[in-house]
Image (tube, helix red, strand yellow):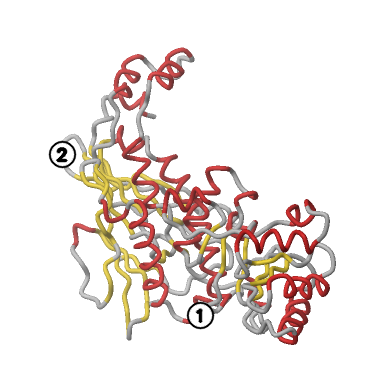
Amino acid sequence: MLDAAIGSGRHERPCVFEAFARRLPDSRRYGVVAGTGRLLELIEQFRFGDEELSFLQQNKIVHSNTIDWLANYRFTGNITGYREGDAYFPGSPVLIVEGSFAEAVLLETLALSVLNYDSAVASAAARMVSAADARPIAEMGSRRTGERSAVASARAAYIAGFSATSNLEAGRSWGVPTMGTAAHSFTLLHDSEAEAFQAQVDAFGPSTTLLVDTYDVEKAVDLAVKVAGTKLGAVRIDSGDLAVQVASVRAQLDSLGATNTRITVTNDLDEHAIAALRAAPVDSYGVGTSVVTGSGHPAAGMVYKLVAHHNDAGEWVSVAKKSTAKASIGGHKAAMRTLEGGLATSELIYQASDGRPDAEGRDLIVELMTNGSADARWLGHDGTLAARNHREQALAELPLNAFRLSRGEPVVPTIYR
């Protein structure tokens, strides 16, 4: 597209692109925006180096004048959109990119790959957090996704309310709190379960978490308290009928005097399994596969569409697709969430040139990048924590129906004005 647009002379036309989701994944009542801070850093760094340019040239993918243009590529436009951590609904203009066609069209795959994955993880993770009913959840899914996605998913889950991750790189890069427990291989390494427990307690003290289901849970719990004492921090259960197992282990720990020893469970959990354990004496959860795969919806379904551009007279022209079931709405938009008594009643989307509607609510569009420079508020450790805090505030605006796990429509309607 870039090569052909350079050929037609239209590549420098000022344009507005918009990233949005036409619909939410089946049964979801809201989505959570994630990946924005990560995306802004990637856009600032997005360049075509000698190796990439040589590949394009040697394989005759684009003409030489396009290669010359790409050699100096740097995005210099403006980006606005929803704050990371905010809720979104069908049609929400999550990301609005303003720049020349050439500069902005190159960002499509980058923007969608980040927003689609991170938002899918955050949206699933938020449902798990709600199901956990204030009990902490750790993200433990690095071995169930790609090596780069593992870091992204840990960050997205933290924004959605998870308490920690087992991925140390997510801690280093984004400030996500880290944690870890021993695996079955650690127990199997030693000549006995007692030796394994003692080695772990010697290394980390009695506040550690001991894995008790390598062999026999009841015997392991008894042994764990003998080795670590009644101040044992926690035991972890990774198999079996968790509701029954947890109740039995709780009673056993209490009978041994380890009344403050916590129980964490980590056995192929998703939001439905977590909700089913709400009445059980579980103290914390560890979730892997389900969170890093969006709990069955690994992509948020966002698209990146041209919605406006300058004509030859320098005037803005709205453009939109009319394809069946894939129609879009043209124009440079803004959005607000209408509120009544502090609760959301609609997602109100309007043409930015028309001005803000006279309605009670919260404006949703913020500045993310100006002249190719990202707003520092949304970057790094601080930006990740800000997104987490904003997610908590944004979800507090949603009606209680938003947090039901049964199939349902978006909890508020999208209204175009």
Which quarter of the figure has residue 51? top left
Residue, x 72% and y 63% (percent of image)?
Answer: 197
Is residue 16 depicted above or below 347 in this figure? above
> In this figure, which residue is indicated by the disc labeled 2?
314
Quadrant assignment, res 351: bottom left
* Residue 318 visible, this orientation: yes
Determine the residue positioned at 32% across, 27% down: 5
Q: Compared to 149, does 141 lie above or below?
A: below
Residue 193 found in image quarter: bottom right
Name the spot of residue 126 as percent of width and height, x first.
51, 67
* Chain-order first, disc 1 or disc 2: 2
Residue type (three-letter) at the residue carrying disc 2: Gly
In this picture, is 170 found above or below 231?
A: above
Horizontal side of 228 relative to 214 (left or right) equals left
Distance, label 1 to label 2, CA atoms, is: 47 Å
Q: Which residue is mark 1?
A: 401
